[in-house]
Amino acid sequence: MMDDLRELYQEVILDHGRHPRNCRRVDDHSHAAEGDNPMCGDRLSVYLKIDEAGTIQDAAFEGRGCAISIASASIMTEMLPGLSEADARRLFDSFHLLVTGQDINESDADLDKLVVMSGVRNYPVRIKCATLAWHAMTAAMDGQATATTE
Amino acid sequence: MTMTAALATNDVAFDTSLVRADFPILSRQVRGRPLVYLDSAASAQKPRQVIDAERRLYEEEYANVHRGVHWLSQSATERFEEARDAVRRFINAAEEREVVFVRGGTEGINLVAQSWGRTNLEEGDRILISTLEHHANIVPWHLLAAERGLVVEAIPIFDDGQIDMDAYRRLLDRPVKLVALTQMSNALGVITPAAEMIRMAHDAGARVMLDSCQAISHGAVDVQALDCDFMVFSGHKIYGPTGIGVLYGKAELLESMPPWQGGGEMIARVTLERSTFKGIPHRFEAGTPAIAQAVGLKAAIDYVTALGMERIAEHEAMLHALAVERLSTIEGLTMFGSHPARAAIVSFNLDGIHPHDVGTIVDHEGVAVRVGHHCAQPLMDRFDVAATVRASFALYNTADEVDALVASLEEVRRLFS
């Protein structure tokens, strides 16, 4: 039984949860949105700097949350720079398949280090934690101020 | 022998093994471990007596109430009205008609806001709510305030989670129409000085809506001694069914209030042009009520009454004291609400570990706690946290379960070390 738990709280996740990367405000951001999880009261702000060609130059976040939501935000912001908006959305689609335990096809985006989040699939109530930052990213690109996981 | 039978025959000590035998769900295993249910503040488990009472009604006496001339309908009506009388005695209301059956505490407060509030409150009128309130005793007043232009002000609390009585006194210096107050914080377990606060409110000319949803299962609630104008509680928090709750209101106030919802069962006469309404409490009970649930609520009240509210309170006080003592030894654990007047609930956080992570990990040990804002976000803001871990105790919990909680928290520490 502890195996599920160890899979959820992998060392990489605990590390990102404790020492999140890109946990800062981007003053010259082009897009920003707040992600709100009404179930637990957690809130994250995601900042994106997207250039005229539509490529993400910088991604960062601020806020408070559980180890799962913070690690997810941390890894997300590491992976976004260099991607186009479309690529970022495709990555979220694949990530969503991963954490909800669905099949991922070769045509889906490469999840790379996000695979450490796969343990979430055994914890349906924690999916919203894992996707909070991603919903905020999508909202930011859509020009919305807030995203809610409800 | 069941616990209630044992207590009836002689003055035995509270024996949780007998009590636990009354609650079928407590013998369940969770993830291969015995269930340690420490979430009764969210909803309490049901004894066999409550489950049987509902089943017996459906199997033997069920029909709609207050309308049939046939035998079954009369029988069901008697059971339903007996439940009302059981509630009256339990909360010591002066009259049965002061007991209105509603879906739960939330509906009771909304009823008062929409019926009493809409007829008695005008633009600029002030309502006081405490920082301890559950969203159910905040949002209905916000809705009404937005519609009517009312002013909602908060009674502050101290760091120990107790009401700041001086601040309350000052807030009452200017005219106040209503004080919306919890008798016991659902997030901290702190018990407010409700009787004194109600007296002060009345001296200032304000009415009081008392939220007893938490308090109701942890000690006697006497509405005449408290002198509250309105009081609500939910059946499911006192070992009864979901979908049934009680709004108590002083008869003269209920009499003065218009219906909230219209429909069958609440009318005196309806023509195509107009309707006239029944007296209280039926005026506020439109439609077919939660009949079996009311009967189940009576069984729950009978159950706790047979055990004795004082004995239950003593048992829970023992568990609470033990939990506070044991949790205090865990490194980096912060408890919220240290005021001595509190019961049955411990609310805490582990330094650097989010409550959601704590909740998931202790669940693996079979320990069910609530993590989150407990529908009390203003209170979370007051303590500058997004969420806490809440363990709550009921009459069926044991000292061993406190140990299980502590051991599971040590597991959290190990995983995150």
Image (cartoon, coloured by chain):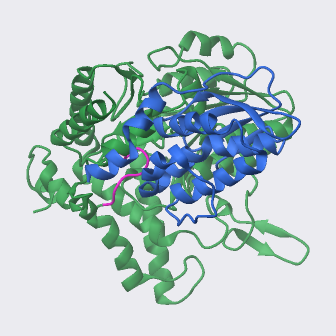
Chain colours: A blue, B green
Q: Is residue B198 visible?
A: no
Residue A145 point in image, percent of width and height: 80, 37
Residue displayed at 36% across by 77% down:
B55
Residue displayed at 39% across by 49% down:
B90
* Front in this rendered view, residue B349 or B253: B349
> Extreme right residue here?
B273
Residue displayed at 70% across by 22% down:
A25
* Front in this rendered view, residue B411 or A39: B411
Quarter that holds the N terminus of chain B: bottom left
- Judge left or right: residue B45 versus residue A97: left
Residue displayed at 46% across by 67% down:
B293
* Front in this rendered view, residue A78 or B91: A78
Predominant SS of the magenta segment = loop
**Figure label count:** 0
- Judge left or right: residue B359 versus residue B377: left
Q: Is residue B319 above or below residue B200?
A: below
Residue B93 point in image, percent of width and height: 48, 47
**Residue B40 covered by magenta stretch:** yes
> In the rendered structure, which segment of residues is drawn in magenta?
B38-46
- Judge left or right: residue A38 versus residue A52: left
Task: Give the quarter of the image for residue B259.
Answer: bottom right
**Residue B262 covered by magenta stretch:** no
Residue B386 point in image, percent of width and height: 54, 30
Q: Is residue B68 above or below residue B345?
A: below
Q: Is residue B81 visible?
A: yes
Quarter that holds the C terminus of chain B: top left
Residue B20 point in image, percent of width and height: 19, 55
- Judge left or right: residue A89 versus residue B292: right
Q: Is residue B135 above or below residue B31?
A: above
* Front in this rendered view, residue B347 or B250: B347
